[in-house]
Image (cartoon, rainbow, N blue to C red):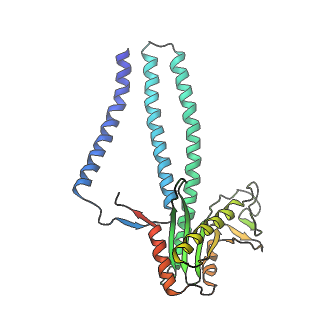
Amino acid sequence: MLQQMWFLLLVPGLPVASLILWMHFLVTKRDRRSRRPFDDMPRPAGYSLQKRTVAILDSCMQMVMLCLVMGVTTWGMYVSSRFPVWIPLGMGLAICSFLAVRAALLVNRYSNGNLGLLGEQLVGQILDQLSSDTVHVFHDLEVVEPGKPAWNIDHVVLTPAGVFAIETKARRKPRETENGHKVTFDGQQLIFPAPLKPDRQSLAQAGRNAGWLAEKLTALNGEPIPVIPAVVLPGWWVTGTGTGPVPAFNPKALKGFLSKRPTVLSPSRVRAIQAQLTERSRIDLSR
């Protein structure tokens, strides 16, 4: 009976292991014979969230494999007659409960991450359409500081009118709620329709990001470089007349927000900042 259990374990395990080893061999062989024609590229909108959602999908695949292996193991313990029935039954229930809770958490994280990714991509496309010789758009500006987890600024726009740090916040809308498509901005918080809670954190985050970027650019350029923060809410009708340090609006208002400002940066300063932002917003593909 023990031999039967080992047989049940090897039947699904050997093909999977063989496939993984074969794929690894093919990738290694390809990398030895050729290389990419380029070593870096600009970071696309939502790149950090894209990596995060891919990692979540990898975790889901690992869970599926674990479920298959543990299912076969439990069945092997049952048919081997070496264990009382309650042992494989209890093990199966415990594993199923753990996987169910884990799956629920992963599905929720993936759903939220994917929504955020779509929101950043939508806003990124709108900003890219505004790009020109005088409007320079950067996405997913990565920030890596010693001793701190990496974070990013969703979008940075550089124009002669200044530097803009834009955060995208994609939120689901409640169903069957009156005015469920509207969010009120009073200058200090975003008031969403019930049952969603008011949001102050997004405005504070945008302000912090702009402050960090202003500090870095000022240090690099040797003169004050103000950075203007903003929060963009794709798909929401933003109402309210409140004014605050961080404005919030629908992506359709981006063009007016960026253009209706006086020139504050000289062409030489714009070129210098453009080079500095370009360096921080590229993907290293050489590794």
- Residue 39 horizontal side relative to residue 82, left or right: left
The percent coordinates of residue 5 (x first, y second) are 38, 20
Q: With respect to residue 95, does 217 lie above or below? A: below
Residue at 43% x, 26% y: name it: 72
Q: Nearer the viewer, residue 211 or 111?
A: 211
- Residue 207 horizontal side relative to residue 142, left or right: right
Quarter-of-image position of residue 99? top right
Q: Nearer the viewer, residue 26 or 48?
A: 48
Instruction: Please indicate, yes or no, whether residue 93 appears anywhere in the rendered image.
Output: yes
- Residue 33 horizontal side relative to residue 92, left or right: left
The percent coordinates of residue 125 (x first, y second) are 52, 71
Residue furthest to the left? 33
Report the quarter where the C terminus lies: bottom left
The percent coordinates of residue 120 (x first, y second) are 55, 64
Instruction: Please indicate, yes or no, whether residue 126 appears anywhere in the rendered image.
Output: no
Q: How many marks?
A: 0
